[in-house]
Image (spheres, helix red, strand yellow):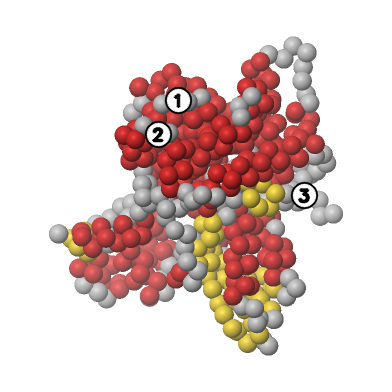
Amino acid sequence: MERFNSDKIRELREINHITQKQLGDMLGISDRAVSKWESGLSKPSGENLISLAKIFNVHVEEFFESISCAKNKKEEISSGMESLTELYKTGRGPSSSHTIGPERACMIFKDRNKDADNFKAILYGSLAKTGKGHCTDEVIRKTFLPYKCDVEFNHILEDIPHPNTMELIAYKDNTEQDRARVLSIGGGSIAFENDVVRKPERIYKLDKFSAISDYCEKKNIRLWQYALENENDDFISYMYNIWDAMKTSIRNGLTDTGELPGGLGVKKKAKSLFNSQHVDETPVTRENRMVCSYAFAVGEQNASGERIVTAPTCGAAGIVPAVLYYQQQKNGYSDESIVRALMTAGIIGNLIKTNASISGAECGCQAEVGSACAMAAGALGELFELSFDKIEYAAEIAIEHHLGLTCDPICGLVQIPCIERNAVAAMRAINAVNLASFLWDTRKISLDTVIRTMKETGIDMHRSYKETSEAGLAKINIDIDEK
């Protein structure tokens, strides 16, 4: 038997140097429809298949492959998940995709071109549109020091493999020595096109929550124990370091004052919020204020270019630490319990990263803040020792009520609405756990289903709402102080 091969359209389109928009115009359809075909979310009609065959001068059969071949290819490409150390990373903000990822790419490229005497970086897509606001160019130049690096923002080329695409070129005596295209795929992770650099190994064999929970229940283990089964001997110490870094970013943020860089004149609010206790403050109000102050603290450290932890990204870095730090301060949970909760959160984040996306440039803010909210809900569920069903429901609620959330930072800065959004999502994670603990046996939607829905929603979302500063709140005109 044969099945439709969605990869074939992209392959033929790129060979013929045709963009998705150009192909859509030829067929009288939208570029989003072409994108859906290439991602496997929909199939062209028989009429469109015939038209495609004519455009590319191939037989219709070229768009089909045997089921056994497709199955083997799928298992080879997408089976399993990477280590949680590829999800949780420490680095400087303000953006995992726009600062941490490019920094890692430049370090690798610089190391493999030790004889080069100058470099050039060309930024495409979201990296080009919001790179100035994210200080991407500054990070790249600093990374290549002491050598000169010219940074070019290319706003024209649209036919790129990922919204966060960059090209790195090495020169010696003004002669090109090496060139590489790199994709910053979210959370600080990168991929060199054509596998110039080996991708991280997929050490987890299972990549669906249903499969993982079934496995854990049969072995009578928790999600964090499943993580320990797959990670190496250094993993526990790595996770303790991650938690220490999270706590440090909160504590530093709670003592910081002044304005955030970038010229918007945004005041740092974490310290003020933390100290704004009222005499008649209720326990509920206090919880809201404390959790939000912790989220603001991390968000403001990130916006200031200070060191934070991707959880799963820089832009959403305040949510997971805020809810866990609050629980530790209020109820005295040990670092060991918190680290276990972080492992559970990591499993959920990894499921989203593997089966959808954690990149705002790819799927909007639902992929960043929505994912972080789900991770925080799962972490709280583990901390409270809830059942797998309740943890799954809490994470599903968290994602479901962020579906369609756009990524539209004003002036490309990770400030408005990003920092406030972290605080709101932290409280939503707490609410999701509370709701799930009561209604877990009434749910109709699985976590795996809502993750798949997030991906479909992200593909349908217009690109101007995916970290381009071209629509939504980003269109609001706020005077920038150039001082």
Query: For the image shown, how many numbered marks are present on the structure?
Result: 3
- Of circles 1 and 3, the one toward us is 1
Q: Amino acid at mark 3?
A: Pro
The answer to whether residue 400 is seen in the rendering is no
Mark 3: which secondary structure? Answer: loop
Q: Position of residue 434 (x, y in %)?
A: 50, 22
Q: Residues within 10 Å of mark 1 (few under 14, many from 20)?
A: some
Q: Earlier in the sequence, mark 1 or mark 3?
A: 3
Q: Residues within 10 Å of mark 3 (few under 14, many from 20)?
A: some
- Of circles 2 and 1, the one toward us is 2
Q: Amino acid at mark 1?
A: Leu
Q: Amino acid at mark 2?
A: Ile
Q: Which residue is mark 1?
A: 386
Position of 482 with respect to 120 (left or right) is: right
Labels 1 & 3 near each other (Cβ < 8 A) = no
Position of 365 with respect to 390 (left or right) is: right
Residue that appears at 59% across and 50% down? 89
Which disc is residue 221 wearing? 2
Mark 1: which secondary structure? Answer: loop
Whole-Å distance between the Cαs marked 1 and 3? 41 Å
Whole-Å distance between the Cαs marked 2 and 1? 13 Å
Residue that appears at 51% across and 40% down? 343
- Of circles 3 and 2, the one toward us is 2
Q: Residue furthest right?
A: 483
Residue that appears at 52% across and 53% down? 86
On the image, which quarter does residue 444 sit in? Answer: top left
Residue that appears at 53% across and 28% down? 383
Q: Earlier in the sequence, mark 2 or mark 1?
A: 2
